[in-house]
Image: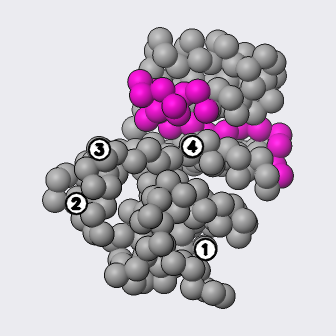
Amino acid sequence: MKKHILVVDDEQDILDLVKYNLQIDGHTVTCVDTGEEALESARSIMPDLILLDLMLPGVDGLQVCKILKQDPTTMQIPIIMLTAKGEEADIVTGLELGADDYITKPFSPRVLLARVKAVSRREFEQSKKSDSDIIRIHNIVIDPGRHKVTINNKPLDLTYSEFKILQTFAQRPGWVFTRYQIVDALRGEDYPVTERAVDVQIVGLRKKLGDYGKYVETVRGVGYRFKE
């Protein structure tokens, strides 16, 4: 599944490396080196995927991610953070803002291509969902095909991760999911995870669910479940 990918990084050697490997894999690649150019390019070319460095001159990568995920015209574009920052707090921040994945430098080109394929595959699978996959529970309606959630007919704005967690829970109400099972549902097997990264996603989801956040229950020492 070949894509038009926007790569944003202020290091020319990284741009060259990423562009070379993506093109070898058959993708079309556009490269920019500032946050301002990233915003302009994302809105003009509407890429299928964005590889976004965190440390950028001017508007940094986190701000670029936040702006794009809040804009209805660009919010559905998958974003993979590409950065030298690997601390837990940076990973959590990126995911909270709606990033779909996170790769730290230095990285293997094979890992990069695998992550690009994984994100592309998730988007493709989401697009194939039909009305028969709609989940209704506790006045919450989850439409995977449209990546849409409503509560009492009012739309709920969720990040990709929050949406996927809610969908996973609602598909099996009463089932207890460990943190690692939650990450598997989000990113696939063998993805590096910290307990805090998962817990922060749950806190954010509960907050957005409002009064319905009570249905996301903590099972002490095990994980989480969605109340039947």
Quickly name the residue at label 4.
98
Q: Quadrant of residue 59?
A: top right
In whole angstroms, how far apart are the C-alphas of marks 3 and 4? 17 Å
| Image position of 22 with respect to 107: above or below | above
Check residue 108 for magenta coloring. no
Q: Nearer the viewer, residue 220 or 211?
A: 211
Q: Secondary structure at mark 3?
A: loop
Chain part drawn in magenta: 66-87
Q: Quadrant of residue 187?
A: bottom right
Amino acid carrying label 2: it is: Asp
Farthest-out residue, bottom: 221
Name the image quarter holding the N terminus. Answer: top left
Quickly name the residue at label 1.
179
In whole angstroms, how far apart are the C-alphas of marks 3 and 1? 26 Å
Q: Which comes sooner in the sequence, label 3 or label 1? A: 3
Q: Residues within 10 Å of mark 4 (few under 14, many from 20)?
A: many
In whole angstroms, how far apart are the C-alphas of marks 2 and 3? 11 Å
Q: Count of labels shown? A: 4
Q: Residue at x 47, y 78 (%)?
A: 225
Quickly name the residue at label 2.
133
64 with respect to 130 (left or right): right
In whole angstroms, how far apart are the C-alphas of marks 1 and 2? 24 Å
Q: Residues within 10 Å of mark 2 (few under 14, many from 20)?
A: few
Q: Residue at x 64, y 26 (%)?
A: 64
Residue 174: x, y in percent?
A: 39, 84
Q: In this rendering, does residue 32 appear at all? A: no
CB within 8 Å, label 3 to label 4: no
Q: Which comes sooner in the sequence, label 4 or label 2? A: 4
Q: Secondary structure at mark 4?
A: loop
Q: Which comes sooner in the sequence, label 1 or label 2? A: 2
